[in-house]
Amino acid sequence: DTNSIYHSDPIIHNDIVIVTPRVADATTRELIEGKYISVKRGSLASEALYRFRDTCGYLFFIVELSSSITSEDMFNDVMRGVFAGTANYKHKARTAAYRMPGIGIQETIEESAPICWEFRTAEARDDFNEWLKEFKSKGNVAYLYRRYYRNRGADHIIRYGQIYSPRL
């Protein structure tokens, strides 16, 4: 079947966090209550943000953006004051906070989201999983992490059940 999608074993697991402008001694509630928070439509972060809003005990408004927007653009929107915050992967938020000193990571709203690759054939997936097992056993995940997240084309995460993967 030419429409079949096969997912690799998880490469890494990553938390989802709320990112806001950096404000000393401010709580997440103070920074987002009654305000607009952006998130990619259809993403794991979107689902996590809705769950967080339903359980956190305070009101904020969720604005779902096109799935084609980059995380960097979302962080820039927060810096410019377009949105009070955004929900995103912790590794991307840390990178943004390093490059954009005005960005702050507020709170983890979902832990251990699996990130994996997507393949068009089971054989390609199986070959990759074998390579990944060996790669991880040598302690090379840090290299893979840097290479994957420096790849701008891999920034687009797509939904498939409970697993999200970069398009290859």
Image (cartoon, rainbow, N blue to C red):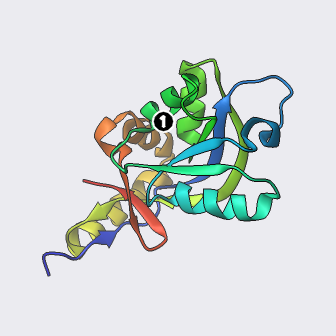
- Relative to 168, 64 lies left or right: right
| Residue sitting at the far right | 25
Q: Nearer the viewer, residue 131 or 158?
A: 158
Task: Give the x, y percent position of residue 80.
Answer: 54, 22
Task: Give the x, y percent position of residue 65.
Answer: 43, 47
Task: Give the x, y percent position of residue 25.
Answer: 86, 27
| Residue sitting at the far left | 2
- Relative to 34, 122 lies left or right: left
Q: Nearer the viewer, residue 33 or 114?
A: 33
Q: Quadrant of the N terminus?
A: bottom left
- Relative to 57, 4 lies left or right: left
- Residue type, label 1: Met
Whether 97 is drawn above or below 125: the answer is above
SS under mark 1: helix
Whether 128 is drawn above or below 74: the answer is below
Q: How many marks?
A: 1
Residue at 62% over, 56% down:
49
Residue at 71% over, 49% down:
108
| Residue sitting at the far bottom | 1
Q: Residues within 10 Å of mark 1 (few under 14, many from 20)?
A: many
Residue beneath label 1, please? 74
Q: Nearer the viewer, residue 22 or 5?
A: 22
Residue at 37% over, 66% down:
8
Residue at 82% over, 58% down:
57
Task: Give the x, y percent position of residue 120.
Answer: 20, 68
Q: Nearer the viewer, residue 59 or 42?
A: 59
